[in-house]
């Protein structure tokens, strides 16, 4: 019998679940809006419901277990979420113990960026590589590093918090309290904030019509339609992303950089400028490293979570 695994991607906005086959195939999916106000117990209950949905009619003996990806910081070996900035009350939550009791299956916990990197490594754009960096750019910036054929974990498994490397010391204030973290400069949130500022100053731009609802997707749409303010914002975003990616090239010497998350919906617009910046700013031996879009799209997280418990 082919073993099946359940992947859970716990996010500040959505909780996603998937039933994944041994070859990475998505057999069933379910998602719901994260009950942030209900606190950890309510969200664990939501996970239980999603698991019941995706495993309806499945032989329990075929289930290898449940992999959970969560925003960090977390302690994977203890199975404890230490704190999620975007979810109030998520401090020292023993999520693995709670889910093991509720689901009666083996449960493994991993940082969401690292989990998605594992998904792309095994079944996506990093397949077959021994060195690559996965970067997810959405509300924040996260990621995971595969180096010398293994997941780079570091002290207390905290390696790969790439969104909090400083790329602009005098820059924007980050959710962590520091200034100029990469995610404060280049996340989808940062792009949305900058776009609203620019649109308010430029009523002639098509962006101005969106008012307070203006976010990164509308910037990409306007750029595709030729709006010059939007094109300028895309160029700015590519430069901010380029700074961080060049740092990652120099630090880890990956064979490929894989870009995922919501902002990768503008990948085709951002890619030429990102490559141009790499050619100008990286040391010569790093200039030819490809930057590609995530192959699993929004499913990198759930597939990666399932990989945590899939054999092989
Ligand atoms: Zn930060």
Image (cartoon, helix red, strand yellow):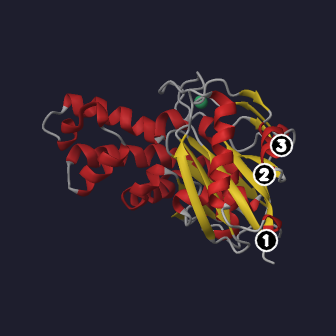
Chain-order first, disc 1 or disc 3: 1
Q: Nearer the viewer, residue 259 or 279?
A: 259
Q: What element carries label 1?
A: loop
Q: Residues within 10 Å of mark 3 (few under 14, many from 20)?
A: few
Q: Residues within 10 Å of mark 1 (few under 14, many from 20)?
A: some
Q: Residue at x 56, y 55 (%)?
A: 30
Q: In which quarter of the image is residue 99?
A: top right
Q: Cβ(mark 2) to ligand 1 < 8 Å?
A: no
State the residue position of label 3. 101
Q: Label 3, label 2: how many angstroms apart (C-alpha)?
A: 30 Å
Q: In which quarter of the image is residue 80?
A: top right
Quadrant (top left, top right, bottom left, bottom right) of the C terminus: bottom right
Taking 235 as reference, is 59 above or below it? below
Chain-order first, disc 1 or disc 2: 1
**Marks 3 and 2 close (CB-CB < 8 Å):** no
Q: Position of residue 49 (x, y in %)?
A: 64, 48
Taking 262 as reference, is 201 above or below it? above
- Residue 250 visible here: no
Q: What element carries label 3?
A: helix
Q: Is mark 2 on a helix, strand or loop?
A: loop
Q: Residue at x 81, y 78 (%)?
A: 1
- Nearer mark to the viewer, of 3 and 2: 3
State the residue position of label 1. 3
Q: Position of residue 90 (x, y in %)?
A: 68, 28
- Nearer mark to the viewer, of 1 and 3: 3
Q: Position of residue 112 (x, y in %)?
A: 66, 47
State the residue position of label 2. 152
């Amino acid at each position: 019998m082919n073993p099946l695994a359940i992947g859970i991607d716990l996010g500040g906005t959505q909780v996603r679940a998937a039933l994944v086959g041994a070859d990475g195939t998505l057999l069933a999916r379910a998602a719901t809006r994260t009950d942030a106000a209900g606190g950890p117990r309510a969200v664990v209950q939501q996970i239980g419901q999603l698991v019941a949905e995706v495993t309806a009619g499945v032989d329990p003996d075929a289930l290898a277990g449940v992999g959970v990806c969560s925003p960090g910081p977390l302690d994977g070996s203890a199975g404890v979420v230490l704190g999620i900035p975007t979810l109030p009350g998520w401090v020292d939550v023993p999520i693995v113990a709670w889910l093991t009791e509720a689901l009666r299956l083996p449960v493994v916990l991993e940082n969401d960026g690292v989990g998605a990197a594992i998904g792309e490594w095994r079944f996506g754009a990093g397949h077959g590589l021994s060195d690559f960096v996965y970067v997810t750019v959405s509300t924040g910036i996260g990621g995971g590093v595969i180096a010398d054929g293994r997941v780079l974990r570091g002290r207390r498994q905290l390696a790969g918090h790439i969104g909090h490397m400083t790329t602009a010391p005098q820059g924007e204030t980050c959710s962590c309290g520091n200034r100029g973290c990469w995610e404060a400069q280049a996340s989808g949130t940062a792009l949305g904030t900058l776009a609203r500022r620019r649109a308010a100053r430029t009523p002639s731009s098509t962006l101005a019509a969106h008012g307070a609802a203006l976010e990164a997707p509308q910037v990409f749409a306007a750029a595709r339609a030729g709006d010059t303010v939007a094109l300028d914002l895309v160029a700015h975003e590519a430069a901010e992303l380029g700074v961080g990616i060049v740092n990652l090239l120099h630090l880890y010497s990956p064979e490929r950089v894989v870009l995922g998350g919501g902002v990768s919906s503008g990948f085709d617009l951002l890619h030429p400028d990102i490559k141009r910046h790499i050619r100008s700013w990286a040391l010569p031996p790093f200039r030819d490293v490809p930057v590609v879009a995530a192959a699993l799209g929004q499913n990198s997280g759930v597939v990666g979570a399932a990989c945590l418990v899939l054999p092989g």
